[in-house]
Amino acid sequence: MSKRAAASGATAANDTIAPEQARVPKAGRPSKPLITRRAAAETALALIDRDGLDALSLQSVARSIGVSAPSLYHHFKDKEELLTQVARCMLEEINREQERWSDDWETRTIELSLATRRVALRHPNAAPLAMRFFPRKLMLPAYERTLIDCPYPPEAHAVLLEVIEKFTYGSSLFAAAAEAHHTPAMPTVDAEHFPYLREALERAPADDEQLYVASLRVILDGLRARYGA
């Protein structure tokens, strides 16, 4: 075969397989990311619910998602940053607790406080993250919304924000800690040694959530008595 014929044959062969080669997909980044910050944080929250906060690692989150651990470092520089996102997810869950919040200031305050408690008890192992990585910057719009239609004078605003927030998170985290460690919030009280305490507990609201709301109402009653409405 002449060199020209061989060259022609090679060209023909290349022409034949070129379309086939064009159909072979090329390797590269997927059109849609395999993971997102939100998906990783939600997975981490589920793992904390199941195994506890101390057991969480970037490796365990990566395994649950089905990716390699280094992939997570494209989204989080370390475990601390991931836990910050988990705390943010819990805050967003509070906002989704009700489709609509009351227009009445006191009723809405109770609804939001109660929603916070319910989310903390739903995720008792993760509840401490609310304090350790409290997303206060994200809370600024909520503070502002609370004050827009607040019935009390401006000099009372910082006080009411402080007392309501500290009661809400303090009581909620206390209850979540008891839940996480499977211990009762109040041990059995011997009536012989603690008669007044025993009577107080017997006369208390029927369940812990009712007691929580009744306690918050005392705070709101105090604000009303002090500052008027």
Image: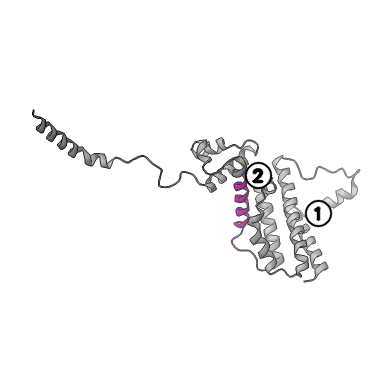
Q: Mark 2 points at which residue?
A: 126
- Does 111 sit above or below residue 35? below
- Does 32 sit above or below residue 107? above
Residue 212's mark? none
Amino acid on which the number 1 mark rests in the picture: Ala
Decide if residue 66 is on the left or right side of residue 119. Answer: left
Furthest-front residue in view?
Answer: 3
116 magenta-colored: no
Amino acid on which the number 2 mark rests in the picture: Ala
Residue numbers of the magenta segment: 83-103
User: Residue 23: x, y in percent?
Assistant: 27, 42
User: Residue 83: x, y in percent?
Assistant: 62, 44
The image quarter in which residue 18 lies = top left
User: Residue 190: x, y in percent?
Assistant: 87, 42
Q: Is mark 1 on a helix, strand or loop?
A: loop
97 magenta-colored: yes
Residue visible at 78% across and 55% down in the picture: 205
The colour style of the image is: one colour
Q: Quadrant of the C terminus?
A: bottom right
**How many numbered marks have been drawn onto this rendered protein structure?**
2
Residue visible at 83% across and 54% down in the picture: 203
The image quarter in which residue 22 lies = top left
Residue 204's mark? 1
Q: Which of marks 1 and 2 is nearer the N terminus?
A: 2
Residue visible at 63% across and 64% down in the picture: 101
Q: What's the CA distance linking mark 1 and mark 2?
A: 29 Å
